[in-house]
Image (cartoon, grey):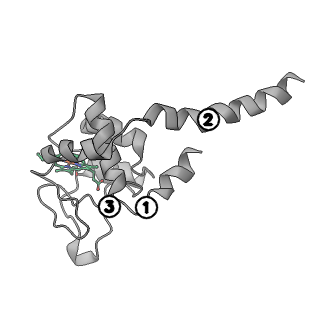
Amino acid sequence: MKTIYLFPTVIFFSVTLVPVVYAGGDAEQGKEVFKKCKMCHTIKEDGKHKFGPNLFGTFGHSAGTNKKDANKKYEKYSRGLKNYGEKGNMWCEENLNRFLKSPKREAKAKMPFNLREEEDRKNVVAYLKENSNNTAACEKRSI
Ligand code: HEC
């Protein structure tokens, strides 16, 4: 009998925990935080690449790739970030949060910047999410 009751409990936790952990990311405040990123990134759809790649649609997209047509590709991805994407990593809340804390530890990436404050990371991730039309990919994955 015990196993029968355990099953709904597991479902309950896996469905509720993810939104609880990531509640509170505020895209409006994230826009403010993103000012720090603008030195190296644009986020407008069809924005150009700077030192870092354009970030429109990055949320819900494979890491180390971008959706631009072949002649507009970002050419400067590091081997580390490409490998990270080739392993099947897609950018969603959890790994973006870890990446922004330490790009090197999360993806062996060569992004010379990080955000120490958890609050800033959550807010800027919410802003990245808002600037993507592929967020459903992450929702499917986390349930
Ligand atoms: C000093 C320049 C610089 C700053 C500031 C910077 N980045 Fe980056 N970012 C880069 C570079 C360069 C890469 C590519 C790294 C690689 O290939 O290893 C990158 C990669 C990324 C990626 C992965 C993109 C992909 O297509 O996989 C994300 C997401 C990202 N940055 C988000 C941010 C956010 C959010 C901020 C601000 C909080 C920020 N970055 C600030 C230079 C920067």
Q: Is residue 59 visible?
A: yes
Q: Earlier in the sequence, mark 2 or mark 1?
A: 2
Residue under the point 19% across and 67% down: 47
Q: Is residue 56 above or below residue 106?
A: below
- The span from disc 2 to disc 1 (Cα, nearest Å) is 22 Å
Residue that carries the numbered disc 3 in the rendered image: 65
Q: Quadrant of residue 69?
A: bottom left
Rendering coords of residue 4 (x, y %): 85, 30
Question: Does residue 47 sit above or below 1 in this rendering?
Answer: below
Classify mark 3 as within 8 Å of ligand 1 or not, answering yes or no: yes
Query: Which of marks 3 and 1 precedes in the sequence?
Result: 3
Quadrant location of the C terminus in the rendered image: top right
Q: Quadrant of residue 73?
A: bottom left
Q: CA distance from mark 1 to mark 3?
A: 14 Å
In the structure shown, which secondary structural element does the residue marked by tag 3 occupy? loop
Is the CB of the residue bearing disc 1 within 8 angstroms of ligand 1?
Answer: no
The residue shown at (13%, 51%) is 38
Describe the element under mark 2 as helix, strand or loop: helix
Q: Which residue is disc 2 drawn over?
A: 14
